Image: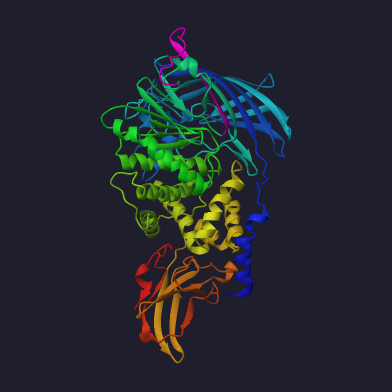
């Protein structure tokens, strides 16, 4: 390794704690919601009032604002309906179902009145977006108060939210209220809802829901009046105050979140577990022969999962989390998730871990999931494989054992995408992928490979430091891909912009080959060839016939440094840089060719080489 490269790595490792990389400085809009909801379970409808304090912390003057009206997507002819019928591979949960909804089965949100600081405003509903013209602009560094009355109807369960889901849950109330669109350094994000991703403003929610008293509610936020509610929120043996009338009013507060979800059913079983650190885990499910044992065992598993996640990925910042049977699969929200519950124990743990990990990458970091879906789904999928393998090693998942490479299925998914001819760059907006296939495997599999492959580039110690620094630097700040990659540059001392550009903004593939092994006067010449278009640093393992081996790292010149040794027991050395423009590289070994058993590129398989048949030569 060149001396300056060695010093760069040592400096980044030793002096990193002294540099004080603090919370990133980027302005954020802020909201304070107060909502009161009166719910009619006979009609599946509700009326609501909303008071919204909006803080314009931007340097810009705002002349319009926009609200999401997500429930309007569940109407024949909506953008979601049209999109689902024109994609070549529509989501089976949506398909042509929206177009068949009857008037009492559709969803809607209707705004009846809207004022700003007491002055009535002009507004227009355009599908799932409410366009609002302001009477006076909202100046920078000022706040205003919007007040609204609205009516809603809960659609049949189709995608994420709705009523009467396939497992019999009455109400999965996600994306259910008029929600102010996000305005950030890139401007307004008033995207029509077509069943893809979300983006929101952090703020405080104060929500009161009046519903028939036999219903049990779980969701985001802390219940403020358990003594009036009961339903599992009081200590065992303590009874709630007698209800007046046929309804109960549930009062929740959720601080510093960017959404609010709830679910309700009269037959929910509600259990809870209070962790040693004070965090309360809630579990809501319909008890039957398929759920009672698995959901009964779930609290212990998720307790252990939280402990591991907090140490590896960052400290969860809230005091409660709810696992709720509902929805149409698995979907994350602040402090809670909706998951279908009639699952085997391995499946239940897997979906619970995955949706929980969204609380780190979507609920706390809060990347714009519409623009960068892979920064949430991919990183969450990466973490899911890691956590699930830990839980398997701890014998917490029946029938599952620890595996050497938990990411093998993730790489297989990416390889399937790369060979399909349908891959699109990860920089594609979530709504604008040409197929669900490309969106899904790109956002989940290729996004997860990004992180595990980054470990190959910079080394596991640097990756582990970077995961924690990324979370602690960018929590509640909506990081973009450049913000993220800079964190890993800081912890590694390496330039990584090339990695981001190739993996995110292109569909170029990796393919390296051991092209030849030739005898030369001083030993052996190994000719390496870059077959694919994406350049990468290489770890080349030389296995000798006497049983010894060594790892030779060949950095890219554009990295401006090299990865340090990851394994102290195997000899490791760094060779001269491989200029990224060069299609081949000559590696010179002192040993004779007759002493060499094999030469192999990346036996760890962390590099996503699309053709491993040419990676090893005997």
Res. 590 in view = yes
Q: Is residue 241 magenta?
A: yes
Q: Between residue 429 and residue 465, name the one nearer to us.
A: 465
Q: Between residue 567 and residue 35, name the one nearer to us.
A: 567
Of all residues shown, which one is farthest toward the left? 289
Report the residue at 36% width, 41% height from top.
Answer: 349
Of all residues shown, which one is farthest toward the top? 245
Q: How far across and down, in percent of the image, does residue 522 sit?
A: 46, 90
Q: Quadrant of residue 494?
A: bottom right
Q: Quadrant of residue 147?
A: top right
Q: How far across and down, in percent of the image, does residue 15 sit?
A: 65, 60
Q: How far across and down, in percent of the image, does residue 291 sit?
A: 30, 31
Q: Is residue 498 above or below residue 274?
A: below
Q: Which region shows up in magenta?
A: 235-257
Location of the C terminus by quadrant is: bottom left
Q: Is residue 405 magenta?
A: no
Res. 439 in view = no
Total number of numbered labels? 0
- Display coloring: rainbow
Q: Is residue 191 above or below residue 491?
A: above
Left or right of 478 in this view: 86: left
Q: How far across and down, in percent of the image, does residue 76 sit?
A: 41, 29
Q: Is residue 439 above or below residue 12?
A: above
Location of the N terminus by quadrant is: bottom right
Q: Is residue 246 above or below residue 197?
A: above
């Amino acid at each position: 390794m060149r001396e300056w490269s060695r010093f760069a790595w040592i400096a980044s490792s030793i002096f990193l704690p002294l540099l004080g990389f603090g919370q990133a400085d980027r302005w954020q809009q802020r909201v304070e919601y107060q909502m009161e909801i009166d719910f009619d379970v006979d009609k599946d409808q509700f009326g609501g009032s909303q008071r919204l304090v909006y803080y314009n912390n931007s340097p810009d003057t705002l002349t319009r604002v926009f609200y999401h009206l997500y429930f309007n997507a569940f109407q024949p002819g909506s953008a979601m309906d049209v999109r689902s019928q024109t994609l070549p591979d529509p989501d089976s949960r949506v398909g042509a179902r929206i177009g068949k909804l009857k008037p009492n089965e559709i969803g809607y949100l209707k705004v009846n009145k809207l004022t700003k600081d007491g002055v009535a405003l002009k507004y227009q509903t355009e599908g799932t977006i409410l366009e609002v013209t302001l009477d006076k602009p909202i100046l920078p560094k000022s706040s205003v108060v919007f007040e609204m009355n609205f009516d809603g109807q809960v659609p049949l369960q189709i995608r994420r939210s709705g009523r009467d889901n396939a497992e019999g849950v009455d109400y999965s109330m996600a994306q259910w209220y008029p929600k102010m669109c996000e305005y950030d350094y890139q401007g307004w994000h008033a995207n029509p809802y077509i069943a893809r991703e979300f983006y929101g403003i952090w703020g405080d929610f104060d929500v009161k829901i009046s519903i028939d008293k036999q219903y049990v509610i779980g969701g985001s936020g802390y219940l403020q009046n358990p003594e009036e509610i009961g339903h599992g929120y009081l200590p065992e043996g303590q009874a709630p105050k007698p209800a007046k009338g046929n309804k109960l009013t549930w009062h929740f507060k959720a601080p510093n979140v960017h959404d609010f979800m709830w679910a309700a059913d009269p037959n929910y079983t509600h259990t809870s577990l209070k962790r040693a650190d004070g965090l309360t885990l809630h579990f809501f499910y319909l008890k039957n022969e398929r759920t009672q044992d698995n959901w009964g065992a779930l609290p212990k598993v998720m307790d252990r999962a939280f402990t591991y996640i907090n140490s590896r990925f960052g400290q969860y910042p809230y005091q409660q989390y709810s696992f709720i049977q509902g929805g149409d699969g698995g979907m994350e929200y602040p402090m809670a998730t909706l998951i279908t519950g009639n699952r085997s124990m391995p499946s239940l743990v897997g979906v619970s871990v995955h949706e929980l990990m969204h609380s780190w990458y979507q609920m706390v970091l809060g990347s714009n999931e519409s623009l960068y879906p892979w920064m949430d789904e991919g990183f969450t999928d990466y973490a899911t494989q890691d956590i699930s393998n830990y839980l398997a090693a701890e014998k917490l998942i029946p029938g599952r054992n620890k595996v050497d490479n938990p990411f093998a299925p993730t790489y297989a998914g990416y390889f399937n995408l790369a060979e399909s001819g349908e891959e699109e760059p990860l920089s594609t907006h979530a709504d604008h992928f040409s197929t669900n296939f490309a969106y899904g495997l790109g956002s989940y599999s290729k996004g997860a490979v990004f992180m595990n492959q980054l470990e190959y580039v910079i080394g596991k110690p640097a990756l582990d430091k970077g995961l924690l620094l990324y979370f602690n630097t960018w929590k509640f700040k909506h990081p973009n891909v450049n913000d993220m990659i800079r964190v890993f540059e800081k912890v590694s001392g390496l330039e990584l912009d090339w990695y981001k550009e190739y993996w995110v903004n292109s569909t170029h593939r990796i393919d390296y080959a051991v092209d030849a092994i030739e005898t030369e006067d001083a030993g052996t010449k190994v000719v390496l060839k870059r077959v694919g278009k994406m350049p990468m640093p290489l770890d080349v393992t030389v296995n000798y016939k006497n049983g010894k081996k060594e790892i030779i790292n060949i950095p890219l010149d554009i990295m401006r440094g090299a990865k340090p040794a990851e394994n102290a027991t195997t000899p490791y050395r760094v060779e001269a840089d491989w200029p990224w423009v060069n299609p081949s590289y000559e590696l010179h070994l002192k040993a004779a060719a007759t002493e060499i058993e094999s030469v192999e590129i990346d036996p760890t398989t962390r590099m996503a080489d699309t053709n491993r048949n040419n990676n090893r030569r005997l």
